[in-house]
Image (cartoon, rainbow, N blue to C red):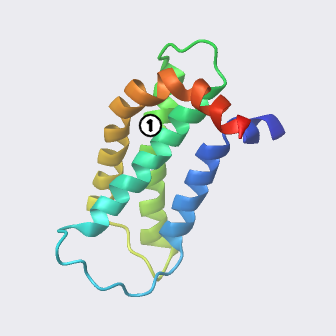
Amino acid sequence: MKRTFRNFFWSILTSVSVFVLSVVPIPEVPQVEDVPLFDKWVHMLMYAFVALAVWFDWYRHREDQRLTFAVFTWAVVYPIMLGGCLELWQAYLTTCRSGEWLDFYADTVGTLIALPVGLWLVRPNARALWKRLCRR
């Protein structure tokens, strides 16, 4: 368990953060009138971060940098499933939040935006970045 937590620290941290942000009551926020669908942009950004954290954690401790089905499943399918489950949670298990299909679509788009970023940026650089961060 300890090794899993250490290996997937950023994935767990971002997933728990998204969960907390999705189920706690939030105060009424004035609409940002300059940005249409501001809430959906926030959803895309949160789930892009979840997917990128999974990419980062998966590749920072692997010698084999090939894209495998397991990596694809965790980095793409997992955040989409997390988004769907949290929208259902909001719809049926909270009284202060509501689940919306457009939020789920925004979660999916954010995850899919992270796919090429993960392939291009995170996969080849995860171990080197981690080593630089640990030296400080």
Most extreme residue toward the front, as rendered? Answer: 136
Measured as percent of width and height from the top left, residue 88 is found at 44, 62
Q: Disc 1 marks which residue?
A: 77
Of residues 103 and 123, which is closer to you in this image?
Answer: 123
Residue in the image at 40% along x and 25% along y: 119
Q: Amino acid at mark 1?
A: Val
Q: Quadrant of the N terminus?
A: top right
Measured as percent of width and height from the top left, residue 68 is found at 50, 17
Residue in the image at 47% along x and 30% along y: 122
Q: Is residue 89 among what the camera can see? A: yes
Of residues 57 and 125, which is closer to you in this image?
Answer: 125
Residue in the image at 40% along x and 46% along y: 48
**Rendering quarter of residue 80:** top left
* Label 1 SS: helix
Q: Is residue 129 above or below residue 19?
A: above
* Relative to 86, 39 lies left or right: left
**Rendering quarter of residue 114:** top left
Measured as percent of width and height from the top left, residue 99 is found at 37, 68
* Relative to 82, 13 lies left or right: right
